[in-house]
Amino acid sequence: MDEAQCQAIREDLGLDKPLVTQYLVYMGGVLTGDWGTTIISKRDRVDGASGRGFR
């Protein structure tokens, strides 16, 4: 994986933003019920958790 691909992944995940911004975006999502998507399946996190249950 070259540097351009790594940078694209960082931008896609929001890791290129300051830590405080990442935290505020995360907390805003949690408070509104948006837990984001899984990295592997690209499905909504809530759908994945409810589909398998919390074990």
Image: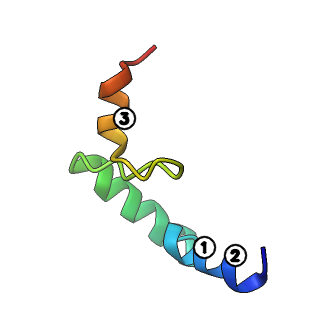
Q: CA distance from mark 1 to mark 2?
A: 6 Å
**Label 1 CA crowd tier, 10 Å (few <14, some 14–19, many 20+):** few
Amino acid under disc 3: Gly
Task: Answer above or below: position of 27 versus 19.
Answer: above
Q: CA distance from mark 2 to mark 3?
A: 26 Å
* Coloring scheme used: rainbow
The number of discs equals 3
- Identify the residue at horizontal 54%, vertical 77% (top origin): 11
Q: x%, y% of residue 1? A: 78, 73
Residue 50, quarter of picture:
top left
Earlier along the polypeptide chain: callout 2 or callout 3?
2
The residue that mark 2 highlights is 6
> Mark 3, mark 1: which one is toward the viewer?
3
Task: Answer above or below: position of 34 versus 9.
Answer: above
The residue that mark 3 highlights is 48
Amino acid under disc 1: Arg
Task: Answer above or below: position of 18 versus 51.
Answer: below
The residue that mark 1 highlights is 10
Q: Say if mark 1 contacts mark 2, CB within 8 Å.
A: yes
